[in-house]
Image (tube, rainbow, N blue to C red):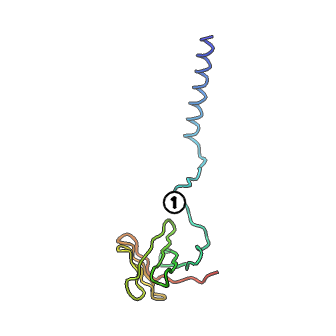
Amino acid sequence: MINQTNQLIAKSLIVLSTLALLSACSTIKIPNPFSSDSKTSGSAPANATAYECENNKHFYLRMLNNGSDAWLIYPDHEVNLSKDGEGRYTSGVITLIVKGAETSLDDGEKVAYRMCKAQAKN
């Protein structure tokens, strides 16, 4: 009886080891729902305007509180910017200047969005 139990344990370990090795070599890519690498959908968020900028950069903008706040919607996160002058919104690090076709966005020292144009809503 002990011999049969040992054989069953040994077979189980072999099967589990084989499955672990096969899964490590697998080419099947399972998407991670918590990853920030996922692409956004093609439709704009509700009540937001899409902006297309040079170098194929883009973001969405939703104005709130009668224009005293700008809700900046990036492909992977969102930020609220407070009004800091005529057509100027900031969070302290991020600065958005909305002046028609001259709209620009500076996101600290990492990213600069230039020559941004509002896109027509569908």
Residue 82 position in % (x across, y down): 41, 78
Residue 69 position in % (x across, y down): 45, 79
> In the image, 106: left or right of 2?
left
The residue under the point 48% across, 69% down is 78
Label 1, residues with CA under 10 Å away: few <14, some 14-19, many ≥20: few
Q: Residue furthest front?
A: 65
Q: Quadrant of residue 81?
A: bottom left
The residue under the point 57% across, 66% down is 40
The quadrant of the rendering that contains the C terminus is bottom right
Above or below — where is 104 with respect to 1? below
The quadrant of the rendering that contains the N terminus is top right
Please tell me whether mark 1 sits on a helix, a strand or a loop: loop
Q: Amino acid at mark 1?
A: Asp
The residue under the point 37% across, 83% down is 84
Q: Quadrant of residue 39?
A: bottom right
Q: Residue furthest right?
A: 122
Above or below — where is 53 with respect to 24? below
The residue under the point 49% across, 85% down is 66
Residue 74 position in % (x across, y down): 49, 70
- Which residue position holds label 1? 37
